[in-house]
Amino acid sequence: MKKKYDEEEISRYKKGLLSILLLHKGKGNEISSGEIANILGIKDGDTHAIVRRLIKSCVYDNHIPLAANGYGYFVITNEDEFREYSNSLAVRAEEILERKNSIQQFYEESLEEVEEEEETIENT
């Protein structure tokens, strides 16, 4: 069973998280969500969903230009890091839109197949 965190715990975690994130400036100084969970003492499982939600909230609350890559999270410190991360987000957005469109097409095709099956049954 997942542990529920109260507002006081969440606030304490966010303060600690802010300090942690601000220590990891620039590409090459990443910190993973697993490392963050360990430092904060959060038992979060393999996906680190709780930590990722806290990071998102902390970033928006504090207007932190945070980037992520395969190694973890880091505060963007220059134009190159910003451009690279921005491009990465744009590619991911395109891929998500392509996946959405494919799923829509597959769904519509499945509806057509059901209609054809129903017509076949009615005509027999």
Image (spheres, helix red, strand yellow):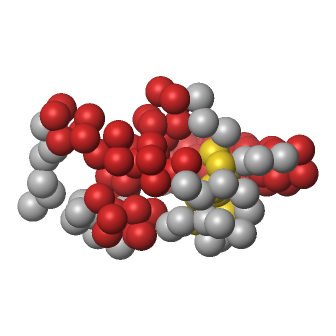
In the depicted view, which residue is nearer to us: 100 or 60?
Answer: 60
> Residue 99: x percent and y percent?
68, 52
The mark total stands at 0
In the depicted view, which residue is nearer to us: 105 or 65?
Answer: 65
In the depicted view, which residue is nearer to us: 49 or 71?
Answer: 71
Quadrant of the rendered image containing residue 12? top left
Image point 60% across, 36% down: which residue? 64
Q: Is residue 120 left or right of residue 13?
A: right
In the depicted view, which residue is nearer to us: 115 or 75?
Answer: 75
Image point 77% across, 47% down: which residue? 77
Image point 67% across, 39% down: which residue? 65
Task: Decide if residue 55 is in sight here.
Answer: yes
> Residue 2: x percent and y percent?
14, 57
From what the image shows, is residue 11 above or below residue 82?
Answer: above
> Residue 39: x percent and y percent?
33, 65
Q: Is residue 55 left or right of residue 104?
A: left
Quadrant of the rendered image containing residue 111? top right
From what the image shows, is residue 81 above or below residue 48?
Answer: above
Task: Decide if residue 116 is in sight here.
Answer: no
Quadrant of the rendered image containing residue 40? bottom left
| Quadrant of the snapshot with the N terminus | bottom left
Q: Is residue 7 left or right of residue 79?
A: left
From what the image shows, is residue 5 above or below residue 71?
Answer: above
